[in-house]
Each structure stands twice: as C-alpha cells, then as structure tokens.
Amino acid sequence: MDFSFLAKYYMFFIYGLKNTILLAIFSVCLGVILGIFLALMKISKNRILNIISTSYIEFIRGTPLLVQLYIIYYGLPNIGIDLPDFLAGIIALSINSAAYVAEIIRAGIQAVDKGQMEAAKSLGMTHNMTMKYIIIPQAFKNILPALGNEFIVVIKESSIVSIIGIHELMYNADTVRGNTFQPFEPLIVVALIYFIITFTLSKLLGLAERRMRVGDQS
Ligand code: ARG
C-alpha cells in the first residue's frame, strides 16, 4: 500500500467532497419541498391528488436512480430540455429523494395517535388548528431523524452521478486512480471519506434525537 499520491492529489478529494456535499444539500432541500407536497397530496381526501402522488411515489421508488438520471441527462435533450450536468444530477437526485421523503412525512404524520385528533376536536379545535398546533409538532419528532437519514442516503447515492461526469468525490477518486495507475488506494481513501461523513452525521443525528425525546414520557 502506497499513499504517497495524496501529497500531490489531496485537492482532488477536497474539491470532490465539496461538490458531493453541495449536491446532497441541494437535492435534499428540493426533495423535502417536493416531498411535503406529495405527502399532503397523499393524505388529502381528494382522489385525483391521491392517485397522482401515489403513482409518483411508486414509480420513482420502483425504478433505479441510474435510469432516472439517464432519462434526465440523455433523454430530455431529445425533447429540447438540455440541462448542464450538475443541474441534471441535482434534479435526478431530488426527484428520487422526494418520493422517499414523501413517505417519511406521511408516515410521520399518520404515526401520531388518532386520539390526539379526537381530543383536540372534542375541545372545539378545527381540523386545521389541530393539524397546526397538535399533530404537526408531534409529527416533527418522527420526521426529523428520518430526514437526517435521508440526507445520509443521498450523500452516498450521489456517487452515482459521477457517471455523467460531475466532478464529485467518486469521480475525482476515479481520476486519481487513473492518473496514478493505483487501482486500490484512492478507492480506499474515498471509501474512508464517505464513511467518516456518514458515521459522524449519524452520531450527530442520534444525539439530536435523544435531545428531542428528553421531554417525552416513556
Ligand atoms: N439505489 C437506489 C436506486 O437505485 C436509490 C435509493 C435512494 N433512496 C433514497 N432514500 N433516496 O433506486
């Protein structure tokens, strides 16, 4: 094992990491915005909205991210939508993530005990008031940790977009692999970098989750 290439190539990893994190942040933010709409559509009483959101969620979760990325990057230019690679990557990741986020939010809301709604209504609160003051604040505790996990998943999944030439962590590690003729060590380095980020994030999430549960009775 020879890691001396790092002295010359460490900037590749740092620059790649920066792009990986940017990709993940943008994708999760957009994914959450879209996911909130999808979740609301899915729990609404309107059948058309239900069907649209259920179809979206099932279709996106039932097809590989790689195929979705290819459709957006290679397919869309055919109908006149030619996206720069970084944007195509963000769009593919957020469209994909939104389907998972929608389910996280829906499940988080529906996991709040039915009795909470009934109790609030019996006190004379309207449906909207109950949602706003009783249900959503409790749902938050279910949703936030899962969203943190989604962020971790997206950091890892973002390595897929290296395939369309986005210079993120995986792509740059592969460049180093090619330049140094060392097939092993650069990949070990990149694996360690991914692991350090995801492990740290998941520890932080665990901490935040425990904080949020401090007020709960067990
Ligand atoms: N590897 C999965 C696929 O090919 C992507 C899973 C994304 N998961 C997520 N929670 N965003 O479809």
Image: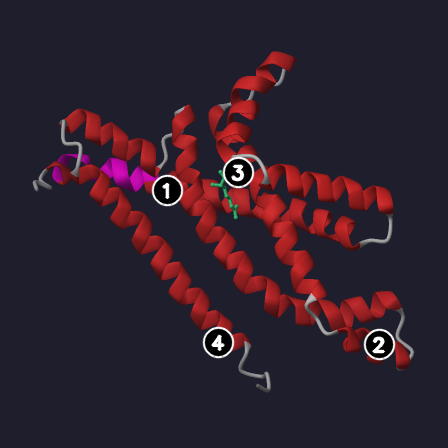
Q: Most prominent secondary structure in the magenta stretch?
A: helix
Q: Is residue 65 above or below residue 74?
A: below
Tell me the magenta residue range.
Answer: 7-16
The picture quadrant where one finds residue 12 is top left
Badge 4 amino acid: Arg
Label placed on residue 210: 4
Dots 1, 3 in contact, CB < 8 A = no
The picture quadrant where one finds residue 205 is bottom left
The residue that disc 2 covers is: 118
Label placed on residue 18: 1
Q: Point out the residue furthest to the right here.
A: 124
Badge 1 amino acid: Lys
Q: Secondary structure at mark 3?
A: helix
Disc 3, ligand 1: is the CB inside 8 Å?
yes
Q: Point out the residue furthest to the bottom here.
A: 217
In this rendering, the label closer to the viewer, 2 or 1: 2
Residue drawn at 30 percent across, 55 percent down: 196
Disc 4, ligand 1: is the CB inside 8 Å?
no
